[in-house]
Amino acid sequence: MRERRWRSALSLAVLALVLSPLVTDRDSFPLSTHPMYAHDRGDVAVFRTVEAVADGQPATLSLALIAETDDPLVAQGRLRDSEARGELATTCARIATRVADDDERFRRAEVVEVVRLTIELRSGERLEREVLARCAIG
């Protein structure tokens, strides 16, 4: 009888911990209330990135050069915040400085909005490309 009560109490405690994010409205393990991945991505993906151009050919820069991070969501957020503040030209110039230190082939950097089919994100094929800011490298 005592063992059964112990198991019941332990089960209730674990259940309370699992459900606690619902009550506290905090994004927490093991139950996330954040809907980041809870919806369909749709047919197209729109995102901002920075490309360096050499001989007319753009090349997407690394996340480290773009935003000094390895997290694509952080890089996206920094570019969107910069755009919202009207500081894309300044951001482009900072990135251009990092590119100049890293690779001397490139002549200019472009902050771009790229539209791709979601299913072909890895292939690199673009539906649209709009330059939002441009700056010289070096």
Image (tube, rainbow, N blue to C red):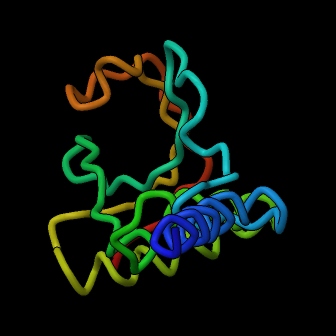
* Viewer can see residue 78: no
35 displayed left or right of 66: right
- Residue in the image at 25% along x and 49% along y: 59
Q: Is residue 123 left or right of residue 128?
A: left
Count of numbered marks? 0
Q: Nearer the viewer, residue 92 or 66?
A: 66
Residue drawn 20% across the image and 26% down it? 123
Image coordinates of residue 5 in percent, x first then y, are 57, 69
Above or below: residue 44 compared with residue 35: above
Q: Is residue 86 left or right of residue 130?
A: right
Residue at x-position 22% and y-position 53%: 54
Q: Nearer the viewer, residue 20 or 16?
A: 16
Q: Quadrant of residue 56?
A: top left
Q: Position of residue 99 (x, y in %)?
A: 30, 75
Q: Quadrant of residue 121?
A: top left
Which is more toward the observer, 66 or 38? 38
Quarter of the image holding residue 90? bottom right
